[in-house]
Image (spheres, rainbow, N blue to C red):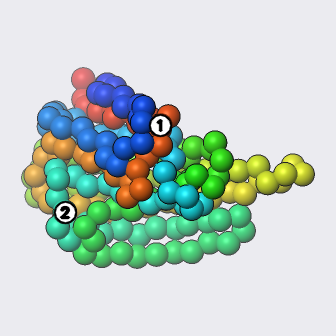
Amino acid sequence: MAVCEALKTTTIEEDTVTVSWTSISDTYQWLEIIGYAKGATVNTIATMYLQLNGDTGSNYAYKNIESFNAAFSIGQNASQTKLNYYIPGKLWGQQCGSVHIYIGQNPASDSHAKSIHGKTGYVKASGSGSFENYTMFTNGYWSDTGDITQIDLKCDDGFVAGTQFTLIGWKDS
């Protein structure tokens, strides 16, 4: 039977660029990040990104599907220094976007890259009962085979106050 533990909840009280969790135990098979976020950029979309164990090398790769209203695009990115996700910027008003990221720790085998699956999205009322919708699904990996001990979520222009993330660990009982 799997056991899940909320390891840490971080609420941004003033604009900040990085949320870090350190000293993560290797006893968790899966790590999960849930929350809601908004970037401090004055644009519609802000780029949030994830890095593991402070690794800024070209050791990440991912494919993503993005949809905005009826349009969609598919992307592929290899040899990246981080995994990108999009969240709303200040032009979306008070709206925060949802964030949900799973990271496979694979503690039983140090010979596997870490699998990372993410989903972000947000909805904005456009008036007259209509809405603008944005969703991004990302499937990627970090090529390092060591245990994950640190997770950094960053936003180049910063996360705004009110952004909140919870790190959850999953393990066998």
Seen in the picture, residue 38 relative to 91 is either above or below; the reply is: above
| Amino acid identity at mark 1 | Ala
Looking at the rendered structure, the secondary structure element under dot 1 is loop
Give the percent coordinates (x, y) of residue 53. Answer: 16, 50
Label 2 or label 1, whichever lies nearer to me, is: 1
Seen in the picture, residue 14 relative to 52 is either above or below; the reply is: above
Looking at the rendered structure, the secondary structure element under dot 2 is loop
Tag 1 residue: 161
Q: Quadrant of residue 126?
A: bottom right
Give the percent coordinates (x, y) of residue 100. Answer: 45, 45
Residue name at image x 50 percent, y 40 percent: 36
| Amino acid identity at mark 2 | Thr
Tag 2 residue: 56
Residue name at image x 33 percent, y 34 percent: 167
Give the percent coordinates (x, y) of residue 71. Answer: 67, 72
Give the percent coordinates (x, y) of residue 124. Answer: 70, 50
**Quadrant the N terminus occupies:** top left
In the picture, the disc for residue 39 is none
Q: Quadrant of residue 135?
A: bottom right
**Quadrant the C terminus occupies:** top left
First in sequence, mark 2 or 1: give its number. Answer: 2
Residue name at image x 14 percent, y 35 percent: 23
Considering depth in this image, is 98 or 173 the residue closer to the camera?
Answer: 98
* Other residues around mark 2 within 10 Å, as few (<14) / some (14–19) / many (≥20): few
Tell me if residue 102 can be seen.
Answer: no
Tell me if residue 126 can be seen.
Answer: yes
- The total of numbered circles placed on residues is 2
Seen in the picture, residue 11 relative to 58 is either above or below; the reply is: above
Left or right of 116? Residue 99 is right
